[in-house]
Amino acid sequence: MAIRIKRSSGNAAPSSLAAGQMAYAEGTGGTAEGGALFIGEIGGNVAEIGGRKYVDKVTNLENNRDLTNLSDVDAASPSNGQVLTWNNSTGQWEAQAPGSGVTTFIALNDSPANYTGAALSWVRVNAAGNGLEFVQDLDDGTF
């Protein structure tokens, strides 16, 4: 016994299918919008379950894995070492050089200004709880 699937040359879903019955909408002129597969559900609903239009979408995704193909990425000429940064005014990610943040411990706002006299010291939070400091011994004792 052969299984026969209802078919249509249009894009629209069938108005009704029996439970388990399948239908295929080819799409006018074979466009990418057509090519949908449907199945009838218990209770009378018609569900779209696949078809050529989904295969075309996946193929398009696989062929466009380059970030510059995304509509919200402006990175036409990225360079080594750049990072993507969100630009709220344009609504896009843009390739830019990384920020020039702190690169050394003593450049932090809440740390000692230099390493003078701090050789072999530990770093701890100060008594006020608002900064870091160098100390020679932990808890002023031995361990």
Image (spheres, helix red, strand yellow):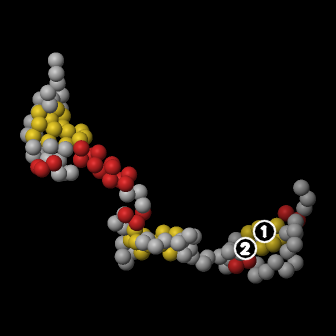
Coordinates of residue 130 in the picture (x, y in percent): 68, 74
Q: For marks 1 and 2, give the CA distance.
A: 11 Å
Q: Residue furthest right?
A: 142
Q: Which mark is residue 105?
A: 2
Q: Position of residue 30 (x, y in %)?
A: 16, 48
Quadrant of res 47:
top left
Pointer 1 with pointer 2, Cβ within 8 A: yes
Report which quarter residue 71 is drawn in.
bottom left
Where does residue 97 sit, x and y in percent of width and height? 54, 75
Q: Could you tell whether 7 is left or right of 135 in the image? A: left
Mark 1 vs 2, N-terminal side: 2
Give residue 41's mark. Answer: none
Is residue 48 visible to the viewer in this orientation of the structure?
Answer: no
Horizontal relation, residue 133 to residue 24: left or right? right
Q: Residue at x 46, y 73 (%)?
A: 77
Q: Which residue of the protein is positioned furthest toward the top in this rendering?
A: 1
Above or below 7: residue 103: below
Where disc 1 sits, the SS reads: strand
- Secondary structure, mark 2, is helix
Task: Tell me: residue 94, above or below residue 10.
Answer: below
Decide: is 141 above or below 40: below
The residue that disc 1 covers is 123
Residue found at the very far front of the displayed protein:
29
> Which amino acid does the dot numbered 2 rest on?
Phe
Q: Where residue 120 appears, x then y in whole percent?
A: 87, 68
User: Of residues 135 and 101, which is closer to you in this image?
Assistant: 101
Give the amino acid at mark 1: Val
Which of the two residues, 51 or 117, is positioned nearer the viewer here? 51
Along the viewing direction, whichever of 130 and 47 lies nearer the viewer: 47
Q: Report the residue at 40% width, 66% height from top.
A: 68
Residue at (37% x, 54% y) in the render: 63
